[in-house]
Amino acid sequence: MISLTTNTGGLKLESPAILASGILDENGYTMKRILDEGAGAVVTKSIGTEERNGYFSPVVAPEGSYLINAMGLPNPGIDFFRDEINIALKSGKPIIGSIFASNTDDFLKLALKMQDYGVSAVELNLSCPHVQGFGSEVGSDPVLVKDIVKNLKGTLKIPVWSKLSPNVTSISEIARASSESDALVLINTVRAMAIDVESKRPVLTNVYGGLSGKAIKPVGLRCVYEARKECDIDIIGVGGIYNYRDALEYIMAGASAFQIGTALMEYGRKVFGDIAMDLESYLKKNNVANIKELVGVAVQ
């Protein structure tokens, strides 16, 4: 019998296809609908200690097969997010709470509240490339990353996932610093920008944003591959996954699950079910009983 079931990051997933943070995941009803339509789990919008409005428009620069965004981490704040999680939890599938902060104490505070709200795991946003004082500024410091992960792992009863940035000198160094996590999530967006040649100005209000979509898949694959060689820890691949072949590349590079984000703009919510169906067909055709048999097969 063909199976896509995987045990990843301390969670059992019916499907390895997960909704990535930042896409249709601030509203509980939307998260539940995506789960009902085939996603194995969803990661919430990144939530901080207080409400943030984010940047003024324009915050998105779409261009063919890729997207640059600088939203500025808009969110309602942790104290106003319980209701959205309660709605999403009605799906019966795992909800992973994404959190961002600038220091260990705030990460711990946020994680404990997410745990209290009933999430299955927390994902640490150590990789947002366009907000000063958060994200990749935190995630590029291996000493701070290690301290954050160690403190959360020593306190929480739920798994801890660390979402890492490709915008660092050595992904292997940050992966080692995060090695007490239950899973590494690789990668977040790549720091980028766009210029409007008519106005002769940067397109985004913040100037810099995060590049996502098909263009970053080779970068994501490289990071997963390097981390797989460096650490014996579950990896969740992210970046440019639009079809089952993209997903298989990440799996063969060492990921046991994967997240989908920008592809929803092109294919909508059905992308989760479509990829799962195509993966099952591939496994059947190649006489592979379970998707986990392919994890890391390309790593030399």
Image (cartoon, rainbow, N blue to C red):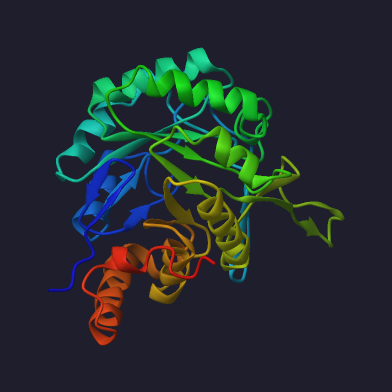
Compared to residue 294, the image places residue 154 above or below, namely: above
Q: Is residue 63 visible?
A: yes
Q: Quadrant of residue 121?
A: top left
Compared to residue 153, the image places residue 217 above or below, namely: below
Compared to residue 223, the image places residue 56 above or below, namely: above
Which residue sits at x=65%, y=33%? 131
Compared to residue 137, the image places residue 294 above or below, namely: below
Q: Position of residue 268 (x, y in %)?
A: 37, 65
Which residue sits at x=60%, y=33%? 135
The C terminus: image quadrant: bottom right
Judge by depth and name the residue closer to the eye, 150 or 192. 150
The N terminus: image quadrant: bottom left
- Residue lying furthest right: 200
Q: Position of residue 165 (x, y in %)?
A: 61, 44
Which residue sits at x=51%, y=33%? 74
Which residue sits at x=19%, y=46%? 93
Judge by depth and name the residue closer to the eye, 76 or 221. 221
- In this rendering, the count of numbered labels is 0
Left or right of residue 141, residue 145 in this image: left
- Residue lying furthest front: 300
Q: Is residue 127 visible?
A: no
Left or right of residue 184, residue 59 in this image: right
Judge by depth and name the residue closer to the eye, 293 or 23. 293
Q: Quadrant of residue 40?
A: bottom left
Left or right of residue 274, residue 72 in this image: right
Judge by depth and name the residue closer to the eye, 61 or 199. 61
Q: Position of residue 20 (x, y in %)?
A: 42, 50
Left or right of residue 58, residue 82 in this image: left
Q: Position of residue 14 (x, y in %)?
A: 20, 56
